[in-house]
Image (tube, rainbow, N blue to C red):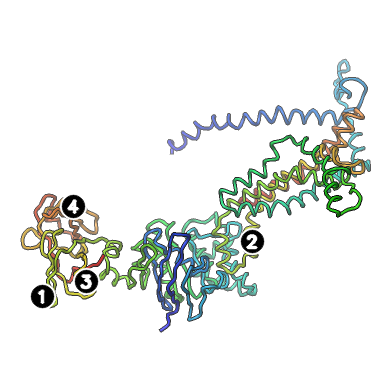
Amino acid sequence: MQSYISIENLAKSYGVVTAVNNISLGIEKGEFFSLLGPSGCGKSTLLRMIAGFETPTSGAIKLEGADVTDVPAHKRPTNMMFQSYALFPHLTVGKNIAFGLQQDGLAKSEIRKRIDEVAEKLQLTALLDRKPAQLSGGQRQRVALARALVKRPKVLLLDEPLGALDKNLRTETQLELVRLQRELGLTFIIVTHDQHEAMTVSTRIAIMKQGQVLQVGSPSEVYETPQSRYVAKFLGETNVFAGSRADRSGSELQIDSDEAGGRLHAAFTDRVALDAPFWVSVRPERVELATSGSGLEGTVEQLTYTGVERHYRVRLKSGATLDARRVNLGAESDLGVGDRVFASWSPQASRLLAE
Amino acid sequence: MLTAATPSTKTNWGKRLLIAIPYAWLLVLFLAPFALVAGISLSTVRLGMPPFEPLTAWDGSILNLRLNFENFLYVLTDDTYLLAYLTSLKVAAISTAAMLFIAYPLAYGIASCSPSSRSLLVFLVIVPFWSSMLIRVYSWMSILRNDGLLNALLLKVGLISEPLRILNTETAIYIGIIYTYLPFMVLPIYSTLSSADRTLIEAARDLGCSRISAFWRVTFPLSLPGVLAGCALVFIPVVGEFVIPDLLGGADTQMIGRAIWLEFFNNRDWPMAAAVTIVLLALLVVPIVYFQSRQSRERT
């Protein structure tokens, strides 16, 4: 089945540097799709190719089945919200929003109607006569969004749209974006390096590294079942131990890890080849710490109180460190720095990872 | 609150001194001579040194102040002067427009080059300043003469059969002015174009503009401060230009700078020369105020 947007074997190189390396992706109508990765992973280049600002070296971009690879930016049914917002400083907010509609040659009354509509939706009605220089960061962000949305694009592209906002406003705006996207039923593609942002807004996330997509999935899929060490470490915090040897007994694996200094348990999976180097990962919030019992032995080296949680850093006997977390339920911690602890977790909490 | 107010009062004196020095400079070297010229313009010519009557005379117990407005009345009603003013304004307007048409594409071209070649190209624009303007204007005389380089070339190529008369015509004045003042038009335009945000063009393209309409709707309006600065830098001095029309122009193109020169040195009528100067200044105040207000409006 053809996806709404399908990216086929797309590549982009600048001289000897390969920014995007043979990416294939399908994005469905109405999705809020994230391209997530560190800076320089090619996510912005990929977005700019979808917008039409960069010409791919090879491969194709199709929108509703039609090949748009060679369609110039101004003729694509996509609109972009820029990281810097790129508001026209010489025009008022109203004229910034009207810019694209005037270019399309719409009637004045229709332009007026559409501006009023989008201004109301984004609480910009009172600001229409101001110049961008007179606006706050949050207001500029809304104008940039309005300017792109008013064109009713098939796909809205957002390039690190919230990077310039402070933390509280950012969280608020993320929820606002999700609400808008649902309400309008549009397809959003967002580029971000902030994993929390990607997790908060997306229906699906593509995790990128060095011009390639490592894994695509819903936020819970990529968090719960990362397929590689890189993805597991990039999304949230995790403990990763190299496996030395694995034995299968039924649906369970017994894994010896020299790094962890003990035996780990995991559910069997055929996704990861056990004859190649492999790793076991466990999220800190899944680790249980006890003063006695079985598991990996170690001592509490550091205890951090964050309000919501207590973070424990445990120095294992093997010399490796293990992070564990406990939600703050009001009780005092029974563990302190220097205490001897045993760390354990259920086999279902373990994830086997390839490189 | 108190701690916030203290540093600003402390820096105040330093700031005032910083502003006071250049203002004192302007007062002594601009405002005072201007007052002198204004005074002379209201005086009457006489033989001797200085060649004008003092404005005030002490008559035993009465201080007499004699202001002679005859020079102004003459300047404003005499056809020769009116024509010279109009010619100056016309030459300045036409050459400013011509320079804008030449300089804008040039500046745009330089601004869209790679940063390393940009600095070389800007350097080439200002390289003529390395030699004296007078020498460069004299070189134009030898280029434009009837037996000059240009005519020799055109005759040799066979485009013309007899030499063109360019020197001592209005065309020669335009060539000289455009050549001399072009860098002053190029540099401010280049400066606004090169500092323009490239993503604004992308935003315009994204919103449906072709390259050409993105230029007219975004690049050009954003470069207007540079265009205005360039026009002001060129128009105002060209109106009063003396050397170029004197050396390259003919007797039939009388510009106001030359009229002042003749009045001052040939006729030794200092009051008249001063009156012509004051009227010229008054004329220039109009475009200066216009450019200034446009620029401050662009900035908000």
Q: What amino acid is found at the position of numbered circle 3 in the picture?
A: Ala
**Front-most of residues A1 and A114:** A1
The percent position of residue B57, horizontal first and vertical second, equals 87, 20
Could you tell me which secondary element the residue under label 1 belongs to? strand
The percent position of residue B166, horizontal first and vertical second, equals 87, 46
Q: Which quarter of the picture shows residue B149?
A: top right
- To the question of a shared chain for discs 1 and 4, the answer is yes
Q: Measure how far apart labels 1 and 3 are at the Cα level.
A: 16 Å
What residue would you read off at disc 2? B215
Q: Measure how far apart labels 2 and 3 are at the Cα level.
A: 57 Å
Q: Of circles 3 and 4, which is in front? A: 3
Q: Measure how far apart labels 3 and 4 are at the Cα level.
A: 36 Å
What residue would you read off at disc 4? A303
Q: Which is more N-terminal, label 3 or label 1?
A: 1
Q: Of circles 1 and 3, which is in front? A: 3
Residue A158 shows in this picture: no
User: Would you say A129 lies left or right of B96 here?
Assistant: left
Q: Of circles 2 and 1, which is in front? A: 1
Q: What residue lies at 64% left-to-right and 74% top-to-bottom?
A: A107
Q: What amino acid is found at the position of numbered circle 1 in the picture?
A: Ser
* Label 4 crowd bin: few (<14), some (14–19), many (20+), radius 10 Å: some
Q: Which mark is residue A249?
A: 1
Could you tell me which secondary element the residue under label 3 belongs to? loop
Q: What amino acid is found at the position of numbered circle 2 in the picture?
A: Phe
Is residue B279 placed above or below A27 in the rendered structure? above
User: Would you say B127 lies left or right of A75 here?
Assistant: right
Q: What amino acid is found at the position of numbered circle 4 in the picture?
A: Leu
Is residue A59 placed above or below B104 in the rendered structure? below
